[in-house]
Image (tube, helix red, strand yellow):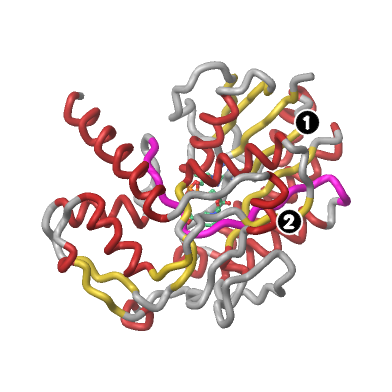
Amino acid sequence: MYKRILIVGANGLVGQKLTEIFSRDRAFDLLISARQSEAYNKAASFGYVQLDATNLAAVKELVWNFAPDFIINAAAYTDVDGCEREKELSWRANVSAVENLVAASRLVGARVVHISTDYVFDGKAGPYDETATPNPLSYYGKEKLASENAVRASGENWLIVRTMVVFGVAPKVKKNFAIWLAQELQQGRRVNVVSDQIGNATLADDLARGIYELVRHNKRGLYHVAGADILSRYEFAQKLADAFGFDKSLVNPIKTADLNQLAPRPLRSGLITLKAQAELGITFLSSDEAIAIFKRQFLESASAQSRQ
Ligand SMILES: NC(=O)c1ccc[n+]([C@@H]2O[C@H](COP(=O)([O-])OP(=O)(O)OC[C@H]3O[C@@H](n4cnc5c(N)ncnc54)[C@H](OP(=O)(O)O)[C@@H]3O)[C@@H](O)[C@H]2O)c1
């Protein structure tokens, strides 16, 4: 029997990749939603509804009418330093919206599938598995932990997927770490990259595949889904430069403290993904594999733009 899936925040990077993978599988009846008037992802076979997840009445109405089996939440206020400046606004998107989805899910018995982050950890002793105790450093991390708790408090019918350093290419998405790097290095510009932030970098397509497999296997509970290798941002940047054939010496290692960012970052982070891999019988992409796919997407998107 096919399952009904509602994706919220479908115009973000992860939302678009989720749309792609679920829309390819006829076992799912897909409805996607985002704040904009249209879907950025033009993959076939899904309906689209405009939805701001902070609007409880609108969320309830949509969920009641569509009666999904799964509500996948890819919406969030993801500007980590912005969260420190705009606490109320970011809380509404990162916590209140999740509470709305949880409340609406109860109307129809839907499972809430929520995406969280390694920023719930302090980065003192990563990598972390699903049993590790969170201790967020930043306001964003606190919000994401509060959103996890809102989902957990809803009962048994939930799935939380923590991931980290998500990168990839999709129409009109915010510039992520890998896109920024590739664009700068392509122009021959020097880039400062932190060598003391350690963890897994995750291709958005691979994260979407992990979430898709968790849903397909009807999993509940907490899972870590991230790229296979644990490495520093600097090491990642060097690999990316190598893969593209850019000048590696343009990548200059710096320390996180030199950036004077508003939000503190977990440094020795990383997510252990053995639970998901063992239960699903899959492996996540190595950084070399992920960068090779990213490179193809980046070059395709650049050539499509130059044709327009
Ligand atoms: N990116 C990472 O490195 C990373 C790491 C760990 C976890 N995550 C988590 O992964 C999830 C997806 O993030 P992403 O990387 O895809 O980020 P993204 O590209 O910034 O996408 C987030 C989307 O959420 C939308 N949104 C914000 N507030 C909304 C609201 N009230 N109603 C509906 N949509 C709303 C945004 O729309 P607008 O464009 O209209 O603002 C944006 O399209 C988030 O839960 C994030 O916390 C991301």
Q: Name the outermost residue toward the left.
A: 188
- Identify residue for label 2: 222
Could you classify mark 2 by the number of other residues whose Cα lies within 10 Å: few (under 14), some (14-19), or many (20 or more)?
A: many
Is residue 160 toward the left or the right of residue 173 in the image? right
- Among the 4 quarters of the image, the one containing residue 171: top left
Q: Position of residue 174 (x, y in %)?
A: 38, 47
Element on which disc 2 rests: strand
Is residue 4 toward the left or the right of residue 284 in the image? right
Image quarter where the N terminus lies is top right
Q: Tag 1: residue type? A: Asp
Q: Position of residue 51 (x, y in %)?
A: 60, 33
Q: Position of residue 116 (x, y in %)?
A: 62, 56
Q: Which residues are magenta?
A: 155-170
* Residue 283 to residue 17: above or below: below
Residue occupying the point 55% across, 35% down: 34
- Identify residue for label 1: 69
Specify whether tag 2 is near ligand 1 (CB below 8 Å).
no
Residue occupying the point 23% across, 57% down: 241
Q: Position of residue 167 (x, y in %)?
A: 41, 51
* Residue 123 to residue 81: above or below: below
Mark pair 2, 1: CA separation: 18 Å
Q: Earlier in the sequence, mark 2 or mark 1?
A: 1
